[in-house]
Image (tube, rainbow, N blue to C red):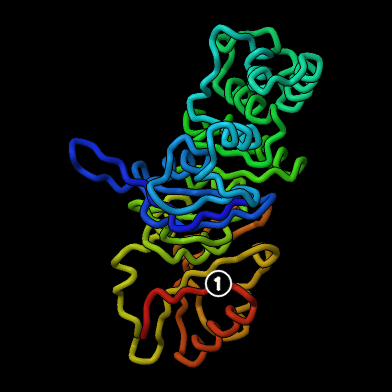
Amino acid sequence: MIEIKNLTKIYTASGQKIVALDKVSLTVNKGEIFGIIGLSGAGKSTLVRCINMLEKPTAGSIMVNGQEITALKKDELRAVRQKIGMIFQHFNLLSSRTVFDNIMFPLEIAKVPRKDAVRRTRELLELVGLADKADVYPAQLSGGQKQRVGIARALANNPKLLLSDEATSALDPQTTRSILQLIRDINRQFNLTVLLITHDMNVIKEVCDRVAVIDDSRIVEVGDVMSVFTAPASPTARSFVNSVLNREVPTELLHRSSAVNGQVHTRLVRVAFIGSSAGEPIISSLIRKFNVDANILYGNIDRIKDTPFGNLTLELIGQPRALQEALAYLQNRGLEIEVLNDV
């Protein structure tokens, strides 16, 4: 659906060159919800603005639905943009227009016959749950309702691609969950490709299929969301995951002695339980089978999109051979294991 190759964007300010994007390459598949996460200033908003050509790239190529868009003329680009919906952080609604007229506005621009535009607008009001707000003005709406209007407006021209730039960052947690659920429902119902920009790993966890981590204008990691959560490869991704799952282990535990009485040893391990294994009594089985003790230092059960996900930090105590067998047992059960200290 989207194929980006060596995308570069350089701004010039006060005679200085500022690199906003540095040779970014990325592929987004049709029908998936793809997240891009990064800190403020990392380049994520510039990336999404280049994809709909609100910003012209300095170099590189962008293919959207098989069409190279970086070299299009204005009229051609206008036609392409009609199939790219955009949800903004601050809603960008027209205060002088009702909810109905805000949603119908892009249909007017596209010169859709009024009868068809009215029918489509009513369909969208039902879709986003605002059929009773058609004649209300934006000032009378809550933040979540305003964003629902923004989503409906973005869907007006039946886009193939939906871009969301920090669409939930101005909303409270409960409203954020409802908006993310709406985006998931739209994605499933229409097989709509969604590219979602955020600085919140909880948003990624709730709705995304895959995620790219951007840091200092470059993509530093790409993977399916479960893999990034269970085994983040880059320092930036680890920082984001730790902000959600609290995977950090205190330094004093990492450097404690690995041997007790010269015979009994310890292993500090992090175990990720995915899917059905999150509900199985694996640790109690391990204790019985291998004559080791397990000291649980930290643990939680969460959900990544539709998949249960458990995270445990354990101190395993026992004879060296028993510890090795216990770790092999955990790995053979298909669990993600990370040894945090060594004998």
Name the quadrant of the C terminus. bottom left
Q: How many marks?
A: 1
User: As shown in the figure, which amino acid type bears the numbered disc 1?
Assistant: Glu
Disc 1 target residue: 336
Name the spot of residue 160 as percent of width and height, x first: 68, 41
For residue 256, which quarter of the picture? bottom left
Q: Quadrant of residue 120 in the image?
A: top right
Which is nearer the eye, 8 or 68?
68
Residue under the image location 42 percent in, 50 percent down? 243
Q: Is residue 17 left or right of residue 68?
A: left
Identify the secondary structure beneath mark 1.
strand
* Residue nearer the viewer, 298 or 291: 298
Using the image as rendered, state which of residue 167 and residue 288 is in the foreground: 167
The residue sitting at the left extreme is 15
Asked whether residue 9 appears in the rendered view, the answer is yes
Q: Residue at x 62, y 46 (%)?
A: 207
In the image, residue 138 sits, relative to residue 181, either above or below, namely above
From the viewer's side, name the closer residue of 343 and 63.
Answer: 63
Q: Is residue 177 visible?
A: no
Left or right placement of residue 89 versus residue 155 in this view: left
On screen, 296 above or below 37? below
Residue at the image position 52 percent from the left and 59 percent from the top? 229
Q: Quadrant of residue 130?
A: top right
Q: Is residue 258 above or below residue 93?
A: below
Residue 126 position, x and y percent, is: 77, 23
